[in-house]
Image (cartoon, helix red, strand yellow):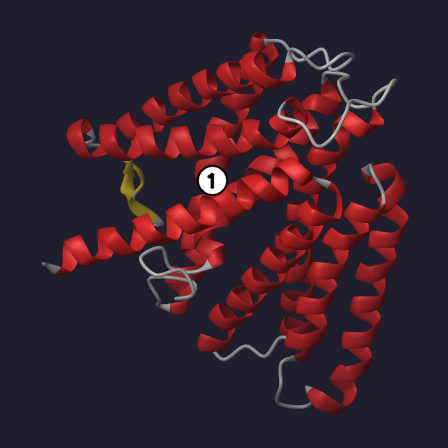
Amino acid sequence: MGPHDSELRRRVVVAVVGIPLVLVSLYMGGWWFGVAAAATAMIATVELFGLVAVGGGRPYGIIGVAASGAVVLLATAEPTPADAGAYILGVLVALVLITLTASVWLRWPEGNPQAAVAVTLLGSVYVGGTLSFAVFLRNLPATFSPPFASPSWPAMGFVLLPLVAVWVGDTVAFFVGHAWGRRKLFPEASPGKTVAGGVAGLIGSTTAGAVVAALTLSPIPGAGVSPLTGALIGAVIGVAAPLGDVAESVLKREAGVKDSGHILPGHGGFLDRIDSLLFAFPVAYGVLALLGKVG
């Protein structure tokens, strides 16, 4: 067995184990999903801080990781951004004040206190803040009048739509880009991405959004998410998700590493797996809000 076959086998094993766990927690919703999302946020934040440390940065790891998880758990406790916003803002403000105070003793004069505080806050917002929108999306059916039954298959749809749109778009972009891609989309940041792959990925995400909406969201009373609306959300995700992937690639290139971690054999780190979703979840919620689908 060659190294390529071994790599593929590791990828398949991780997918076979990981995908059912994600779907079960998503189906159950509530604290099942919230705790899983918070754990993911904390692991990904550890990996982000690791990238920074490679370049000599010294973020406040423990408190930054804890704040990233706390943001997601607060989103779990409160069903909407309006309800959770004040608490999340309080956590972020407290994080800044604590790290600034700690810098007096722990980062001055040679510890680059500005960078330490900024990167610590970045971890909580970039990872915890964006993943909290996955929880807000999962909470949406419970905010309708009358509330929609959960756990249930349709109740998963608001999270499944960005998940599937990202997966389909990325898969289609990969195969089309390798077969016909010539012109680079992000030549400096991500040479593997091509214009042909980007266009194909956009079409794939748009189609996936329409299909998921038709299968899961259209049946929800009061949701008002038609296949056309799903296609629109998928199209916006088709633009946002590659940007999320490239943004994380820039962070890795600055650190001079290929993967954010090695916790997922054949896949790299958690941050590598969710980088596109960190853009897709808040974008999906934002489009729903702009269309008046969020109460």
Does any portion of residue 233 appear in the rendered image?
Answer: yes
Does any portion of residue 60 appear in the rendered image?
Answer: no
Depth check, front residue: 272 or 120? 272
Residue position marked by numbered label 1 in the rendering: 243
| x and y, in percent, of residue 165 in the image | 48, 28
User: Against 213, is 82 above or below?
Assistant: below
User: Against 248, is 282 above or below?
Assistant: above
Q: Residue at x 14, y 60 (%)?
A: 3
Q: Residue at x 33, y 47 (%)?
A: 190
| Image quarter of the N terminus | bottom left
| Image quarter of the C terminus | top right
Residue 92 shown left or right of residue 48 in the figure:
right
User: Against 61, is 131 above or below?
Assistant: above
Determine the secondary structure under disc 1: helix
Identify which amino acid the numbered label 1 is placed on: Leu
Residue 151 shown left or right of residue 262 in the figure:
right
Depth check, front residue: 134 or 243? 134
| x and y, in percent, of residue 183 in the image | 23, 32
Depth check, front residue: 227 or 145? 145
State the residue lying farthest toward the left.
1
